[in-house]
Image (spheres, rainbow, N blue to C red):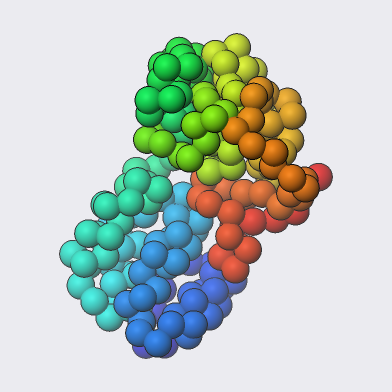
């Protein structure tokens, strides 16, 4: 590999090499490398996009066009936990705006009482995340919980702030803060997200929880 990766950890540099080697064309690795950049830097910075462009041998503009299309690639620094509240029609009709407001207000209150330079919890609204039967649906670092009310959203944000879990588990959050589910989830999943990116084992963003 000719490109020199900037301030990426040695472990993630090894992951970069493995990811690129898995594709017949280097440019096919853009999205996995952007996820890896998000894990390394907490968001996809301009420097990270230039590094990815060099790695896959295309222009930074081409990488930016991918990163800007998908909302899961954040262009600004985010907290350790991203709380994503679905506000599409099913969730909206089940009080998503109130859930979103409760989460935002609680996160702001937590941040004002903290000495951290960067907010620990970021809150956003998102379009449909495919759990209409369990509205209102919420994700924390892209781990799903369903049937969330404003009161449960407040409790969830406070729990994230107080406990700072190293691994975010969907089943644990559902049990603590969820309500009606859209379907039976089946067996308990012991692996979850380790940061504000989706949990993918090969990228190092998934670990087994407690």
Q: Judge left or right: residue 100 versus residue 184.
A: left
Tell me where residue 176 appears, x and y as whole percent: 73, 25
Tell me where residue 71 appears, x and y as whole percent: 35, 46
The quadrant where residue 104 appears: top left
Residue name at image x 66 percent, y 49 percent: 192
Residue name at image x 44 percent, y 30 percent: 86
Is residue 81 in view? no
Tell me where residue 57 appears, x and y as whole percent: 27, 80
In which quadrant will I find the C terminus? top right
In which quadrant will I find the N terminus? bottom left
Residue name at image x 49 percent, y 77 percent: 19
Is residue 202 in view? yes
Count of numbered marks: 0
Tell me where residue 44 appears, x and y as whole percent: 36, 54
The quadrant where residue 154 appears: top right
Question: In the displayed image of the protein, which residue is found farthest to the right?
Answer: 210
Residue name at image x 74 percent, y 49 percent: 189
């Amino acid at each position: 590999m000719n490109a020199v990766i900037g301030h990426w950890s040695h472990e993630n540099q090894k992951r970069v090499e493995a990811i690129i080697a898995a594709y017949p064309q280097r440019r096919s690795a853009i999205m996995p490398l952007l996820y890896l950049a998000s894990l390394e830097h907490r968001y996809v910075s301009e420097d990270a996009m230039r590094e990815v462009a060099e790695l896959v041998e295309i222009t930074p503009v081409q990488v930016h066009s991918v990163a800007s299309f998908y909302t899961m690639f954040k262009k600004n620094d985010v907290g350790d936990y991203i709380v994503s509240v679905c506000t599409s029609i099913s969730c909206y009709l089940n009080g998503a705006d109130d859930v979103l407001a409760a989460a935002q207000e609680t996160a702001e209150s937590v941040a004002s009482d903290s000495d951290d330079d960067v907010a620990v919890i970021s809150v956003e609204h998102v379009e449909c995340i495919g759990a209409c039967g369990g509205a209102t649906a919420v994700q924390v670092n892209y781990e799903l919980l369903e049937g969330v009310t404003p009161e449960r959203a407040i409790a969830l944000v406070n729990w994230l702030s107080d406990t700072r879990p190293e691994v975010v588990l969907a089943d644990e959050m559902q049990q603590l803060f969820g309500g009606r589910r859209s379907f039976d989830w089946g067996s308990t999943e012991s692996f979850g997200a380790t940061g504000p990116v989706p949990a993918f084992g090969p990228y190092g963003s998934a670990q087994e929880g407690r």
